């Protein structure tokens, strides 16, 4: 669209189904490259991607031509299929339903980038559940805790 100028920075956070710790370090970088290709193919700009065994964070410069929900649907479906096709796991891989999407101004990007790059160190101190609930509270997002995480029963 001509004469359309935007600066939209969004951090996406989503987890492995039941928060299983299955995103092994040996192939995580390959997964991040695959997700980067999806983001780029959809005309968005990847700023940083990182995570740990049970979830990932993605900071994106978002183009307004595609909805957040559509982009995340494509990322999660395509990466699930890719992980299963590569047979990285002995079981079927799935992402948990839903995601977090948190917007930032340009002045906050350096801090967010550092935070995402230091995920492993950060999660030695704080669990994913605690982190995610903290995000929801910090951004004043109303939620029902029984719908935030699907537990394995």
Image (cartoon, grey):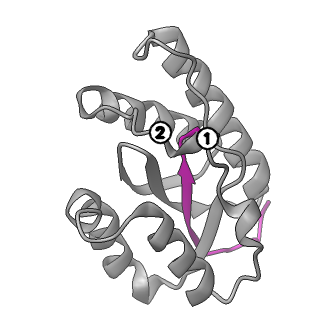
**Label 2, residues with CA under 10 Å away: few <14, some 14-19, many ≥20:** some
Residue 28 magenta-highlighted: no
Callouts 2 and 1 close, C-beta under 8 Å: yes
**Horizontal arrangement in the rendering, residue 148 relative to residue 89 (left or right):** right
Q: Which mark is residue 152?
A: 1
* Position of residue 105 in the picture relative to residue 118 (left or right): right
Mark 1, residues whose alpha carbon is within 10 Å: few (<14), some, or many (≥20)? Answer: few
Q: Residue at x 57, y 18 (%)?
A: 92
The residue drawn where x is 51% and y is 80% is 134
How far apart, in angstroms, are the residues tagged by discs 2 and 1?
9 Å
**Tally of marks:** 2
Range covered by the magenta-colored residues: 1-17
Of the 4 image quadrants, the one containing the C terminus is top right
Q: Quadrant of the N terminus?
A: bottom right
- Give above or below for 96 relative to 68: above
The image shows residue 118 at horizontal and vertical percentages of 24, 64
The disc label shown at residue 20, or none: 2
Q: Please determine whether, in this image, residue 137 is positioned above or below residue 9.
A: below
* Closer to us: 61 or 116: 116
For image coordinates 45% across by 10% down, the residue present is 87
Element under disc 2: loop
In this picture, is 102 found above or below 51? below
Pick the residue in front: 49 or 90.
90
Question: Of tags 2 and 1, which is closer to the observer?
Answer: 1
Give the mark nearest the N terminus, 2 or 1: 2
Side (left or right) of 29 relative to 61: left
């Amino acid at each position: 669209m001509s004469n359309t100028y935007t600066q939209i920075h969004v951090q996406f956070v989503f987890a492995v189904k039941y928060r299983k710790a299955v995103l092994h370090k040996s192939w995580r970088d390959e997964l991040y490259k695959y997700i980067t290709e999806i983001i780029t193919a959809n005309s968005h700009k990847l700023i940083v991607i990182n995570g740990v065994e049970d979830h990932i964070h993605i900071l994106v410069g978002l183009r307004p031509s595609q909805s957040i929900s559509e982009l995340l649907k494509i990322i999660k479906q395509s990466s699930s299929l890719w992980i299963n096709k590569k047979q990285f796991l002995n079981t079927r891989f799935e992402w948990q339903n839903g995601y977090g999407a948190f917007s930032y101004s340009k002045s906050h990007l350096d801090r967010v980038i550092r935070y995402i790059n230091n995920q492993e160190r950060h999660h030695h101190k704080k669990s994913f559940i605690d982190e995610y609930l903290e995000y929801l509270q910090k951004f004043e997002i109303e939620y029902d805790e029984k719908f935030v995480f699907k537990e394995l029963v």
